[in-house]
Image: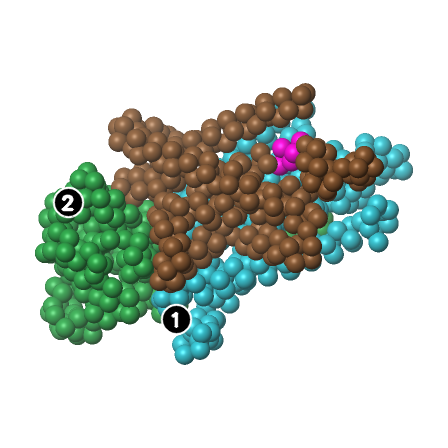
Amino acid sequence: MWSRAGSVSAAIAAVVLTFAPGAHAKEWTTVRIGTEGAYPPFNFMDSNQQLQGFDIDIAKAICEKEKVACEIVAQDWDGLIPALLAGKYDAIFASMSITEERAKTIAFSERYYRSPALFVASKGNASLASTPKGLAGKTVGAQSGTVSATYLQAVYAPAGVDVKLYATQDEANLDLSSGRLDAMLADKVVMLPWLEKSQDGGCCQVIGQDVSDPKYFGDGIGAGMRKSDPELKALIDKGIADIRADGTYDKINAKYFPFSLY
Amino acid sequence: MSPLGPLAWGASGWGDEIAAGLWLTVRLALATLPVGLAIGFGVALMKQSRLRVVSGLGELYTTVFRGLPELLTIFLVYFGAPRLVGDISGFAAGLIALALVFGAFSSEVLLGAMRGVPDGQREAAEALGFSTGAAFRHVMLPQVWRLALPGLTNNWLVMLKDTSLVSVVALTELMRASDVAARATREPFLFYLVACLLYLALSIVSSFIAAWLERRAGRGIPTAGRA
Amino acid sequence: MGEVFAFIGFDPELFARYAPALLSGLWTTLSLVAISTPLGFALGIPIALARYQGGATTNALAVGFTGFFRGTPLLAQLFLLYYGAAEFNGALKSVGLWWLFRDAFTCAALVFTLNTAAYQAEILRGAMAAVPAGQTEAGMALGLGRAMINRLIVWPQAMRLALRPLGNELILMIKASSIASVITVVDLMGATKRAFSGSLSFELYLWAALIYLALVEIVRRVWNALERRWRIA
């Protein structure tokens, strides 16, 4: 067993070989795209391990329009920006809000859709006011690292709201329907289909008005890129404009939502 | 739909995805084993060194990687490695992190085993004309191996379960495959239970193989209490 | 070189911003361990006794329990009992047990207790089995009953043997408690992850690493001191 040094060195070589240096071709022919894969209907994994959803369709349409090859990989939400910076892929299409805070670290494309957030509460809590005071003492959830999470922590937690943050939106949904959460803050375009169509969604309803404080919620949803790749930003911005102009965007939009997302 | 419908094979069910995850878990653990053993062996030799600096480094290594939560080690490797050496895949990050931990625990086991082989064995081999290297390989190693096996088996079982933690860096091994399926189908109990049972099966199979290896390594050695 | 400094760098502003959150996370970590480990010990004793001298049924139950909790990953157990239990929240509510599963902290404490009970039971069983048979026989010769033999002869010797592995188990629990962060518990690991997603500063993970290492080292030394005292006594 010990004498089989061959297998040991082969394994070490295999590890070393995976340290592939990031490609720095400025002539973009292949764009690697990172998404979360746990945020239906925008990005999710189907039972064939294929990524599906609005973000994915938009990314593919842009790639096709701008004649670049695209590879799409899944990455946990919390690791999306670090992995982009680490060069694991070149662009993020994961329903990420364009915020000042994130723009310090990464570059954003122009927006490709926009959604306010809103509060959803279990039916038993339907009479609650969605203000910090109204939710004081209640447990309110959001997905960690999202604009909703930042907003809850900054505005609601100081008022005595117990803020719980989840790695994925799906897990927050599960906990809202099982009654662990009294309420939840999330993007309206994700919450409305969930409330209407999913079997768990019957537990709950919207409380209060849309939430869109620009200080926290930024200016819509865009693709994220490294700041060192201005050519890629130009390419994706052009792609968004092109698919808006030729009707591809509207087709994708209609596939998922009966109203305009833009 | 039958209660096991979500586990069906093919496009409609998650059975094939879970199986693929299981296979990735097995591959990750098997690939980690030789690297971790090599690290453990190297660190054990370091700790035996007469040079204080070398043995001190060996001790420091063990203290750090035995003391850190495995989850944190995985994060450190996954997010830290790109800063030092460039991008690595989730599989490589998992492999390195698990091997670092396995190496730390195994160095203790191997050190104990090395000390457990009487010095006279080496002296006898050298008296018979074995070179130092040959004496180590043919006389010492088989005995170290026999003494270390139970401890290494234990470390293997721990590492096998720790592979589940690599799911947090987006590697679709058994745990994450179950997780994705549980969320998509809204049947967390079924899928997490299946995951638990599959891990249990891996542990049981490992224990049988380890018992066989121990019997094999112990050939010709009379032991008390074994029929 | 600059990369290396950036890698191990220390940013006082970042520290001022996140230190309180990490400290409160550390407190949660300590509470989790301080609740689960003793409860696990208490639960481990009857399981160890069932393995040591139980009838066929109790022995089989104990084997099943310890086999399940030692043979599967803690992460899978946690997901099973946290998200799995939520599927049955109606049933759990009707038997008045939902509170135990509803809160992520109590649910994590429950899973950790069951998990460490399995490991501690194995340690205790091994230690009791290691007490030479002659000791029990001597007790019987003196006319002592089974319970008295266990309490007066086997137990004190077994505890002395079990002290070191129990210390290791305590350290393993401190490390394993970081897994609670995946079900929204804001322990030291959870607080670090939150701070990381807010600042994207890798340094935070290094601080967490140092805190865990210090914690483990303190426990190790305290335990060694305890052990020395117990051996002399």
Q: How is the image coloured?
A: by chain
Give the colour of chain C: brown
Query: Considering depth in this image, is A97 or B134 the residue closer to the camera?
Result: A97
Give the colour of chain B: cyan
Q: Is residue A250 above or below residue C224?
A: below
Question: x, y percentage for residue C45?
Answer: 60, 43
Please tell me which residue is depicted at 52% across the width and 38% down the height of the picture.
Answer: C38
Please tell me which residue is depicted at 42% across the width and 47% down the height of the picture.
Answer: C108
Does the magenta run of residues contain C164?
yes
Q: Is residue A145 above or below residue B189?
A: above
Question: x, y percentage for residue C229?
Answer: 63, 21
Q: Residues within 10 Å of mark 1 (few under 14, many from 20)?
A: many
Q: Is residue B197 left or right of residue C141?
A: left
Letter of the chain that mark 1 sits on in the rendering? A
Query: Considering depth in this image, is C191 or B186 the residue closer to the camera?
Result: B186
Residue annotated with mark 1: A47
Query: Considering depth in this image, is A177 or A71 the residue closer to the camera?
Result: A177
Name the residue type under label 2. Answer: Pro
Between discs 1 and 2, the one toward the N terminus: 1
Q: Is residue B219 left or right of residue A50?
A: right
The image quadrant that residue C137 belongs to is: top right
Letter of the chain that mark 2 sits on in the rendering? A
Magenta segment boundaries in residue numbering? C159-165
Give the residue at the far right of this rendering.
Answer: B128
Q: Is residue C226 above or below residue B163?
A: above
Q: Which chain is green?
A: A
Is residue C140 among the parts visible in the rendering? yes
Residue annotated with mark 2: A132
Q: Callout 1: helix, strand or loop?
A: loop
